Amino acid sequence: MIRQPLILVTNDDGILAPGLAALVEVVREIGEVIVVAPDSPQSGKGHAITIDEPLRINEVEAFDEVRAYECSGTPVDCVKLAMNVIEKDRPFDLCVSGINHGSNASINIIYSGTLSAAMEASLEGVNSIGFSLLDYSFDADFSKCKSYIAEICRLALEHGLGETNLLNVNIPLGDIKGVRICRQAEARWVEEFQQGKDPRGKSYYWLTGRFDNGSSPEETDLKALDEGYISIVPSMHDLTHYKAIAGLTKFAEIKV
Amino acid sequence: MIRQPLILVTNDDGILAPGLAALVEVVREIGEVIVVAPDSPQSGKGHAITIDEPLRINEVEAFDEVRAYECSGTPVDCVKLAMNVIEKDRPFDLCVSGINHGSNASINIIYSGTLSAAMEASLEGVNSIGFSLLDYSFDADFSKCKSYIAEICRLALEHGLGETNLLNVNIPLGDIKGVRICRQAEARWVEEFQQGKDPRGKSYYWLTGRFDNGSSPEETDLKALDEGYISIVPSMHDLTHYKAIAGLTKFAEIKV
């Protein structure tokens, strides 16, 4: 008997998110699935880990015939618990995270719990993919992207991910024209804070902002998405700016 | 009159951390300083932002003749508040974060609130530097590194940071032999969870782990630190794995 691939599924929108259910539906056809997801929404948690308090794990009946656990921590905590406590004796063949309700294209990758969870698994040598649909609503329609996600996961299991082991996959709204491999766009959030007074008259500041796409003629994820294509950005955890090393020799000459 | 440089100081160990006080002492000699730091320790918060609840800001008398604010959010929230609320009409010339109590070399950069705060400022175009001393204790001795930090900040203000605008600076214990510009080492955490029962008999899992340095003959931050040098890694927020793009053409051919 050929062993089925073992697939870890996680997300940052929490165990009850429809995007998670959609992803489970796709990958349960491909392998043995274990779900380990946060017990509450964890959007914007980036690569946060919980070190100052204990974590909890509860097995839950969230999906038919799929082992599933909710955890009290961040998305990265979920992956650490999955690999070191829940399923510590068998290595995962693939980790998929999402489907996120909302874009993780461009600079969003650094704020994203979805992608940070996938990155954490990739650090442990597991091929990992974060999936995000460009619709922030709870009842987003995940039906159009499922067959693409299935094919991407099958290819990853059959052929690996080449020189990387982490993909950031974003899915446009509407009809999908195909798939493009591209780089992360240079875009940014223009921040604003909603200011107000609480019921006791004390000031508060609530983060808001709008996404400034910038513009680029190059093959970026934002361009692919704009044109109706799924964007796949091969990603990495090495943040070294190699080209900048040579220009910093003055700093190596510091004497005090 | 020549305008003094405007310097934002933040950290992830919180407004009361001795490492923050040491950094303020250094940069107050160089420019006009504004401190915006978390009101509680925020280690391991990575690039987390607070979106589901309001944030608070309190001006505090923490340092003689230096404007200082404590905020209720993460280190990245502190930087966003500094730039968009507290000092929104004047651009900062430099952002410094730390001095962190403990290493942020190698892969620690992705978990680090200290470096994420600096990265957030760099995203807004401000030259930014995260400083970390390889001593996790509260009463770490910051005296030996102050003159190096002063020189690094002066150089950054005078000459800029070349092709990057983000430096990850780690400082060894003991006598400092000099400064090296290097790349982020490939190292990893070997995770373990301390398991126990709480007073009500419910299981908990508490993250622990040991750092596996690996070994590399190349010029990495860990090697520099091992040999008694301050490591400076020019860093970036573009996580694209460019070399991996060419190997993923199969994914671009997916048809459903």
Image (cartoon, coloured by chain):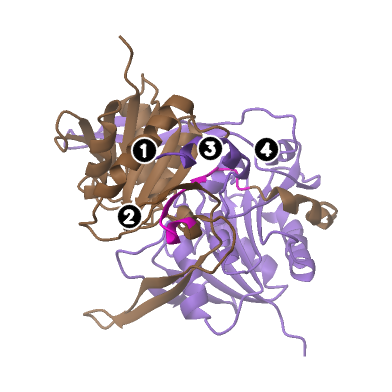
Chain colours: A purple, B brown
B229 within the magenta span: yes
Image quarter of residue A18: bottom right
Is circle 4 on the same chain as circle 2?
no
A22 within the magenta span: no
User: Which residue is denoted by mark 4 in the rendering?
Assistant: A222
Identify the residue at horizontal 41%, vertical 72% (top origin). B210
Q: Looking at the picture, which amino acid does disc 2 mark?
A: Asp
Mark 4 vs mark 1, foreground winner is: 1
User: Which residue is denoted by mark 2 in the rendering?
Assistant: B175
Asked if B245 appears above or below A216 in the picture, the reply is: below
User: Which mark is first along the chain, 4 or 3?
Assistant: 4
Left-right relation of B250 to B218: right
User: Which residue is denoted by mark 1 in the rendering?
Assistant: B96
Which chain letter matches label 3? A
For this orientation, the residue located farthest to the bottom is A1
**What whole-number distance in Å separates the C-alpha atoms at marks 3 and 4?**
32 Å
**What whole-number distance in Å separates the C-alpha atoms at marks 4 and 1?**
31 Å
| Residue A199 spot, x, y in % from top left | 20, 37
User: Which residue is denoted by mark 3 in the rendering?
Assistant: A248
Q: Looking at the picture, which amino acid does disc 4 mark?
A: Leu
Is circle 4 on the same chain as circle 1?
no
- Are the residues tagged 3 and 2 within 8 Å (C-beta)? no
Which chain letter matches label 2? B
Left-right relation of A50 to A27: left
For the C terminus of chain A, the quadrant is top left
Mark 1 vs mark 3, foreground winner is: 3
Circle number at residue A92: none
